[in-house]
């Protein structure tokens, strides 16, 4: 990224907004120029995932004292998908699947690697080029990127094991050498452990195991290999679960629990008594606690968490003052600070973002008090006059509160054409505050955009999640239709000026909304919509869902409801035009249902439309295809809602 672009980035963060033209799809849906940044433990370097001119994600390192920039990992057939520091001068990274390539094309580069900050001493940890794969890190293992002592020598990884029916049953804990990928499984007699906590010293400290329908939280006693049971609860009662969160440098342990309530809160755990503190460290009225600790100079310095908007709770007065200094320079963004864990480096990494500003990364020098831009995810995007997201609440017909994000075009008043946007359905993580590309793309074209967080979403409490179980296409569809009614009742839109756009299971619900007699939208667009669940039911394999108590396996009928009562997209002819966009490699059943749906609509003289993308499956990976899809959606909406 050039210096001029960096200066433009700084200006966009510091200056007030003005009117701007509709966002080009390429500016919104192209891969980010910078996708991640992390400060080294000693605060002397920053690693970044950056996009090459050829569209490949690479790993770069910036030496902060000299501003020297180097690409230390790149492969023309693979993207760097994840990375983390495991020492002051050592990184762990993963080569993963390219966005643009034939689905069946092999690549032996995929896997985990270790590398020095200067690009030397790369180690193939997954054994891709070895004569023997013995003791190479298994391809199914997932490194615990935040659970390491940061000595540059070892890291922990989890290898999830499944039973014959595909149910995740336990997780092996693997201590792995950064230099070679050789590992040893952590030996224990705890049975089937489902969750582990590695403390700040890099040692296993808490474990959640399951046996005979009971889960238990167990504590490792000091440096011994003796484990003690602290709590037990029925496996099918996740509200009673006490789950590991993190260990602090002083040896204290933190867990999450509901204590009989609806939302998960963060508590300090007394290792001696096994009891939780009387008061929660962080408790949120509307959300389950989700966050991470911030360590600084061997202390727990703060907690970063997400409520209606992201926030940081600082425990040290000097760091609260540091946050105020940075916020004073970047007034229009949320600014998350990363601090050196050791040493006296003056540098602080700042991740700046907002509902109208994609992520950008800067360095704040505590001595000079100046900011230095490092890079931005979308530096070419004109962020002026983007829509500030507003959090609203919709009351469903059964009384459940359904939170929703509302984007109204900058400066707009009165009724507008409205798009009900379902980027996913139930059992996905809740949509947090930040730049939401699909919503901003549509709002920049003059549409109000409403994104309901349908029942079953994770992070909104146990009741909200449980209300979605067994209700796919039933109560979840009611949430969609109730959102349409709410928008009309609130005067946001006229009843005949509302369209529904959905992806994946949100696309399935969008199509179902087009089959209704009442609260029917003016049009529907579905992108990779899950138009058939026949194979899911036929396989009978359990579904791994993100729940307020962690990932759990659910039988298909428990998650979605009985197969016989699951609404079909072919139950009746659509009563509104439908645009269908899919990958040509998607399930034949999905394509069959899409074709029959389109034919049924045309028989009703509806303006149906469809398009298939080459070398794509159930998610569009090629940026050119994604850009094209959203341009087609925008043109489809303009035909049926008008161009505001």
Image (tube, helix red, strand yellow):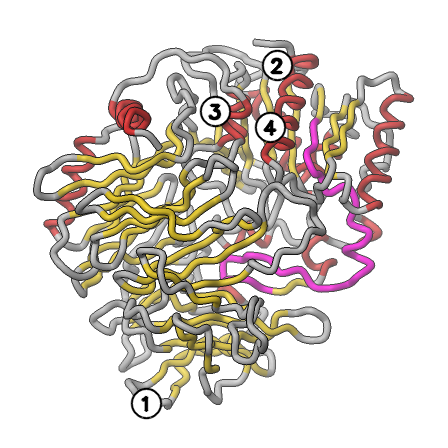
Q: Position of residue 638 (x, y in %)?
A: 65, 13
Q: Residue furthest right?
A: 603
Q: Give how far apart the Cα atoms at labels 1 and 3 are.
A: 55 Å
Q: Which comes sooner in the sequence, label 3 or label 2?
A: 3
- The residue beneath circle 4 is 627
What span is colored magenta in the figure?
Answer: 525-552
The nearer-to-camera label among 4 and 1 is 4
Crowding near the residue tagged with mark 4, few <14, some 14–19, many ≥20 C-alpha atoms within 10 Å: some
In the figure, is residue 337 to the left or right of 444? left
- Location of the N terminus by quadrant is top left
- The residue beneath circle 1 is 224
Q: Position of residue 92 (x, y in %)?
A: 40, 61
Q: Which comes sooner in the sequence, label 4 or label 1?
A: 1
Picture quarter containing residue 279? bottom left
In the figure, is residue 308 to the left or right of 350? right
Q: Give how far apart the Cα atoms at labels 2 and 1 are.
A: 67 Å
Q: Give how far apart the Cα atoms at labels 3 and 4 are.
A: 21 Å
> Is there CB contact under 8 Å for labels 1 and 3?
no
Q: Give how far apart the Cα atoms at labels 4 and 1 are.
A: 56 Å
Which residue is found at the position 46% from the left and 31% from the top?
Answer: 392
Q: Give how far apart the Cα atoms at labels 3 and 2 are.
A: 16 Å
Q: Which comes sooner in the sequence, label 2 or label 1?
A: 1
Which residue is found at the position 51% from the left and 42% from the top?
Answer: 56
- The residue beneath circle 2 is 494
Q: Secondary structure at mark 3?
A: strand
Picture quarter containing residue 196? bottom left
Q: Which comes sooner in the sequence, label 1 or label 3?
A: 1
Q: Give how far apart the Cα atoms at labels 2 and 4 are.
A: 29 Å
């Amino acid at each position: 990224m050039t210096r001029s672009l960096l200066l433009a980035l700084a200006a966009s963060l510091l200056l007030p907004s003005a009117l701007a033209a509709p966002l080009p799809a390429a500016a919104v849906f192209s891969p980010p120029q910078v996708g991640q940044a992390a400060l080294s433990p000693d605060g002397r370097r920053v690693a970044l995932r950056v996009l090459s001119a050829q569209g490949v994600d690479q790993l770069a390192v910036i030496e902060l004292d000299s501003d020297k920039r180097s690409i230390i990992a790149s492969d023309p057939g693979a993207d760097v998908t994840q990375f983390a520091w495991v020492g002051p001068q050592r990184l762990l990274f993963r080569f993963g699947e390219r966005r643009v390539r034939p689905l069946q094309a092999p690549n032996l580069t995929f896997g985990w690697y270790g590398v020095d900050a200067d690009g030397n001493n790369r180690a193939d940890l997954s054994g891709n080029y070895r004569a023997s794969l013995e003791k190479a890190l298994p391809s199914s293992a997932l490194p615990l990127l935040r659970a390491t002592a940061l000595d540059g020598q070892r890291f922990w990884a989890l290898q999830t094991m499944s039973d014959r029916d595909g149910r995740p049953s336990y997780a092996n804990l693997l201590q792995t050498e950064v230099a070679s990928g050789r590992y040893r499984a952590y030996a224990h007699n705890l049975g089937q452990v489902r969750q582990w906590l590695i403390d700040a010293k890099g040692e296993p400290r808490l474990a959640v195991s399951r046996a005979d329908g009971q889960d238990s939280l167990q504590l490792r006693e000091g440096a011994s290999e003796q484990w003690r049971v602290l709590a037990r609860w029925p496996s099918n009662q996740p509200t009673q679960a006490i789950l590991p969160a993190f260990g602090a440098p002083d040896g204290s342990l933190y867990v999450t629990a509901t204590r009989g309530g609806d939302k998960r809160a963060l508590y300090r755990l007394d290792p001696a008594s096994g009891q939780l503190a009387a008061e929660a460290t962080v408790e949120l009225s509307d959300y389950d606690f989700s966050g991470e600790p911030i360590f600084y100079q061997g202390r727990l310095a703060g907690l970063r968490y997400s409520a209606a908007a992201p926030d940081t709770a600082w425990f040290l007065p000097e760091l609260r003052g540091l946050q105020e200094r940075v916020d004073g320079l970047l007034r229009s963004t949320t600014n998350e600070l990363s601090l050196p864990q050791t040493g006296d480096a003056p540098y602080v990494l700042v991740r700046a973002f907002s509902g109208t500003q994609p992520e950008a990364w800067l360095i704040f020098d505590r001595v000079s008090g100046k900011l230095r831009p490092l890079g931005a995810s979308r530096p070419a995007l004109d962020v002026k006059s983007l829509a500030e997201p507003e959090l609203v609440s919709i009351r469903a017909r059964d009384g459940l509160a359904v939170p929703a994000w509302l984007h109204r075009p900058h400066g707009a008043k009165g009724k507008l054409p409205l798009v009900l946007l379902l980027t996913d359905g139930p059992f996905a993580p809740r949509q947090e505050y930040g730049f939401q590309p699909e919503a901003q793309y549509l709002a920049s074209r003059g549409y109000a955009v409403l994104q309901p967080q349908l029942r079953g979403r994770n992070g909104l409490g146990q009741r909200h999640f449980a209300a979605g179980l067994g209700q796919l296409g039933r109560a979840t569809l009611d949430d969609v239709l109730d959102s349409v009614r709410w928008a009309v009742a609130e005067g946001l839109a006229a009843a005949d000026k509302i369209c529904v756009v959905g992806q994946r299971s949100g696309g399935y619900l969008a199509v179902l909304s087009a089959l209704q007699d009442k609260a029917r939208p003016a049009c529907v667009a579905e992108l990779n919509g899950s138009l058939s669940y026949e194979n899911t039911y036929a396989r009978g394999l359990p579904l791994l869902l993100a729940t307020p108590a962690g990932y759990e396996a659910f039988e298909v009928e428990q998650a979605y409801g009985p197969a016989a009562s699951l609404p079909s997209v072919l139950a009746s002819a659509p009563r509104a035009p439908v645009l269908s966009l899919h990958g040509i490699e998607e399930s034949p059943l999905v394509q069959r249902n899409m074709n029959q749906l389109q034919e049924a609509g045309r028989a009703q003289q509806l303006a149906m439309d469809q398009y298939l993308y080459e070398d794509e499956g159930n998610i569009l990976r090629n940026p050119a295809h994604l850009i094209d899809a959203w341009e087609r959606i925008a043109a489809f909406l303009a035909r049926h809602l008008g161009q505001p």
